[in-house]
């Protein structure tokens, strides 16, 4: 067994020698690798920075100036967001009636021009309804302008309940309203005009406990793509007055 012991010592020494040599080579390789990383790769730093300036280069004066600048930038962003919000509100007010949740005349005429152009380009039918309240001046005289405003709001709500999402509803002035109907011919527009008149008559407005009976007349025309918006409104207005004079509903 001693023979075996004597033979084992040189083997152990050789293994130790190989291990030492391997470690040395590994250390040398690691050093070379580290040097290569420093030369060919990006050196990662743990130091913090403010706006790209390393913290180690920040003097108290520079740090204070940067923090002030960052605060001013944040304030400018808040002001810009506020201006965008006010601009959206202004655009909304510019297109809508100040009293009713409807388009004003200017915006209504603009949408009418778009529909006329679309109708001509795509050969799609469209209709226009013109609504006028009956006896609205007498209502104002008897119950006051506040009651008249409430009556207008009520009528606007009734009209909106009778149209589609694709239709446009506007207040054309005073107690006159307009409805632009996409993909509807003159017959369809006349049918809608009748529905609106019947709905207004069938839903009285109550103001301060007083029931106000409301009536309306409505005319309807099919839109011609070649005409101007004001010409289309004039035709619809004439159709409405023909109904009003004839006592039709």
Image (cartoon, rainbow, N blue to C red):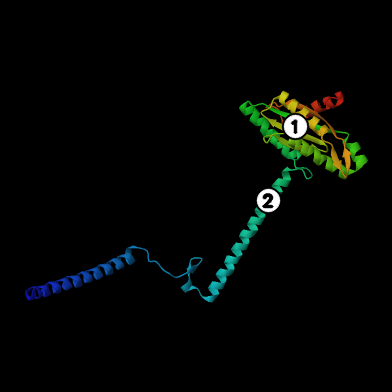
Residue found at the very far front of the displayed protein = 1
Toward which corner of the image does residue 241 lie, by quadrant? top right
Whole-number angstrom distance, CA of label 2 to CA of label 1: 29 Å
Q: Which residue is mark 2?
A: 87
Q: Are marks 2 and 1 in contact (CB under 8 Å)?
A: no
The image shows residue 237, relative to residue 154, as above or below, that is above
- Of residues 64 and 210, which is closer to you in this image? 210
The image shows residue 240, relative to residue 72, as above or below, that is above
Which secondary structure lies at badge 2?
A: helix
Residue 171 visible, this orientation:
no
10 Å crowding of disc 2: few (<14), some (14-19), many (20+): few
10 Å crowding of disc 1: few (<14), some (14-19), many (20+): few
Quadrant in the picture for the N terminus = bottom left
The image shows residue 26, relative to residue 98, as above or below, that is below
- Of residues 30 and 214, which is closer to you in this image? 214
Q: Which residue is mark 1?
A: 230
On the picture, is 220 further left or further right than 77?
right
Q: Which residue: 67% across, 26% down?
A: 125
Q: Which residue: 63% across, 59% down?
A: 78
- Of residues 90 and 208, which is closer to you in this image? 208
Between label 2 and label 1, give the one nearer the viewer.
Answer: 2
Residue found at the very far right of the displayed protein = 142
Q: Position of residue 49 (x, y in %)?
A: 48, 68
Toward which corner of the image does residue 135 lie, by quadrant? top right
On the picture, is 98 further left or further right than 24?
right
The image shows residue 60, relative to residue 138, as above or below, that is below
Q: Position of residue 122 (x, y in %)?
A: 61, 28
Q: Which residue: 81% across, 40% down?
A: 154
On the picture, is 245 further left or further right than 166?
right
Q: Position of residue 30 (x, y in %)?
A: 27, 68
Q: Position of residue 56 (x, y in %)?
A: 46, 73
Q: Which residue: 28% across, 69% down?
A: 31
């Amino acid at each position: 067994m001693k023979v075996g012991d004597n033979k084992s010592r040189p083997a152990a020494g050789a293994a130790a020698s190989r291990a030492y040599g391997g470690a040395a080579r590994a250390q040398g390789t690691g050093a070379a690798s580290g040097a290569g990383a420093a030369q060919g790769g990006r050196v990662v730093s743990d130091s913090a920075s403010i706006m790209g300036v390393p913290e180690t280069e920040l003097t108290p004066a520079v740090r204070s100036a940067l923090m002030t600048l960052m605060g001013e930038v944040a304030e400018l962003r808040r002001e810009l967001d506020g201006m965008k919000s006010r601009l959206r509100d202004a655009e909304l007010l510019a297109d809508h009636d100040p009293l009713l949740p409807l388009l004003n005349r200017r915006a209504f005429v603009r949408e009418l021009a778009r529909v006329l152009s679309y109708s001509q380009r795509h050969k799609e039918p469209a209709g226009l309804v013109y609504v006028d309240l009956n006896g609205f001046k007498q209502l104002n005289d008897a119950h006051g302008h506040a009651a008249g405003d409430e009556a207008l709001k009520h009528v606007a709500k009734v009209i909106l309940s009778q149209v589609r999402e694709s239709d446009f509803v506007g207040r054309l002035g005073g107690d006159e309203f307009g409805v632009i109907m996409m993909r509807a011919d003159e017959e369809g527009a006349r049918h809608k005009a009748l529905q609106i008149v019947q709905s207004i008559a069938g839903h009285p407005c109550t103001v301060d406990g007083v029931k106000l009976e409301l009536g309306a007349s409505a005319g309807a025309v099919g839109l011609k793509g070649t005409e101007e918006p004001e010409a289309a409104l004039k035709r619809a207005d004439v159709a409405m007055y023909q109904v009003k004079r004839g006592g039709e509903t």
